[in-house]
Amino acid sequence: MQFDLSAVETGTFVFIGTLVFAMLIVGFMMTAAFLAMVLVGLGRFAWFVVAGTLLGLVHAINHLWDRLVHHASTVEIPGDFQGQPAPSTGTYPRVALRDS
């Protein structure tokens, strides 16, 4: 027995064509939604990487600054500064200021 398409009604062709078109649209929308989720996930991952890197950089700078200030506070300045003549006020001793 042979299948003859001329025996199929036009309404059936329209119905099958509509289903095929609907399946194409559903496939396109599912693909677009999946790609959107992937892009959002990659953006969020990139944000966490950048934020973590910047946070680590700030902590490293703070740590190095604390070490520098601690080292500077332990350094002893050798000797006292000698007084130097001032143009109109006589002599005055210079004062070495340290972080307290």
Image (tube, rainbow, N blue to C red):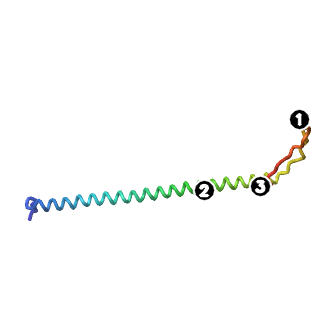
Dot label at residue 88 = 1
- Verify CB contact (< 8 Å) between mark 1 and mark 3: no
Give the amino acid type for the residue marked by disc 3 in the picture.
Answer: His
Whole-percent x, y for residue 5 in the image: 10, 59
- Verify CB contact (< 8 Å) between mark 1 and mark 2: no
Question: Which residue is drawn at the image coordinates 79% and 52% (left, top)?
Answer: 99
* Local secondary structure at mark 3: helix
Question: Which residue is drawn at the image coordinates 74% and 54% (left, top)?
Answer: 67
Question: Which residue is drawn at the image coordinates 75% and 53% (left, top)?
Answer: 69
Give the amino acid type for the residue marked by disc 2 in the picture.
Answer: Leu
Report the residue marked by disc 3: 70
Which quadrant of the view contains residue 18? Answer: bottom left
Left/right placement of residue 23 relative to residue 82 reads left
Number of residues whose C-alpha sits closer than 10 Å to that of mark 3, classed few (under 14), some (14–19) or many (20 or more): few
Report the residue marked by disc 2: 55
First in sequence: mark 3 vs mark 2: 2
Left/right placement of residue 41 relative to residue 56 reads left
* Local secondary structure at mark 2: helix
First in sequence: mark 1 vs mark 2: 2
- Work out which quarter of the rendered image holds the C terminus and state it: bottom right
